[in-house]
Image (cartoon, rainbow, N blue to C red):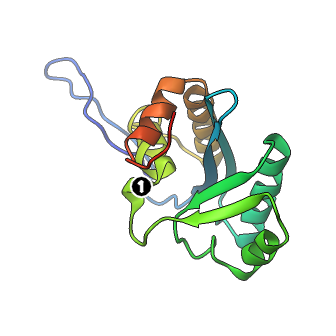
Amino acid sequence: MLPTVRRTWGRRGQPPVLRHRLSHWGKVSAIGAVTLSPQRRRLGLYLDLYPDANVSQEAVVVFLRALGRHLRGPLILVWDRWGVHRGRRVRRYLTGQRRIRPEWLPPYAPDLNPMDKGCWSWMKGHGLANHGLQDVEQLTRAVRHEYDTLRRRQGLLRSSVRATGLPIRL
C-alpha cells in the first residue's frame, strides 16, 4: 500500500503532498506473463491478482491452465527460479503437460525477466506512482487499469522484451 514516490510538478512555493496511511499493511500479489504469438507477431500480457494474499503453487497451476486455454500450440515458459515456480505441485502439473516446457533463467537475473524489468517497472513508475490509495480494493482497481493500458501498448511490451537482451525475435 505504500506508494512509489516519483518526481512531479507543483506550483512554486506549494509542493505537492502525498498522503497515505502508514499503518495499513495491505498488498496485492500478482502473477503475470508476457506472451508472443509467432503467427501474429503480437505480444500478449496476462495477469492474475491476489488481493491480501501470496501467490501459491496452486495459483501458479491455475494460471498455467488458464494460459493454456487462451493460447494455442506449444508453450515455452521462460521462468525465474522463484521457489513457487519450482514447487512440487507445479512440477507435478508440468510433468503431465506435453505442450508446456519450462526454460529457466539463471539465478539472480531479474534483468532477464520482461515482467520484472519492463512491465512492473513501467506500471509502478507511471500509473501507480504517487497514488495515495487508501485500501486494497482501490489498489487492485488501479493495478487492473494499468494492466489494461499496458496490454494495449505493443510498443511498451516490445521494449520490455527487448530490454532483457534475450534472443527472442519480435
Q: Residue furthest top?
A: 11
Residue at image coords 67%, 79%: 87
Q: Where residue 47 sits: x, y (%)?
A: 66, 45
Q: Is residue 14 left or right of residue 39?
A: left
Q: Closest to the observer: 3 or 12?
A: 3
Q: Closest to the observer: 138 or 98?
A: 98
Residue at image coords 78%, 64%: 61
Residue at image coords 27%, 28%: 8
Quarter holding residue 88: bottom right
The local crowd at label 1, few if under 14, some if 14 to 19, many if 20 or more residues have their Cα within 10 Å, is many
Q: Where residue 50 sits: x, y (%)?
A: 69, 56
Q: Closest to the observer: 2 or 92?
A: 92
38 relative to 76, above or below: above
Q: Is residue 126 left or right of residue 66?
A: left
Q: Where residue 142 sits: x, y (%)?
A: 58, 36
Quarter holding residue 95: bottom right
Q: Circle 1 sits in a helix, a strand or a loop, which is it?
A: helix
Q: How many marks?
A: 1
18 relative to 136, above or below: above
Residue at image coords 72%, 71%: 57
Q: Which amino acid, by three-letter code, is at mark 1?
A: Leu
Q: Closest to the observer: 144 or 170?
A: 170
Q: Where residue 30 sits: x, y (%)?
A: 62, 54
Residue 131 in sight from this viewpoint:
no
Quarter holding residue 99: bottom right
Q: Which residue is under mark 1? A: 112
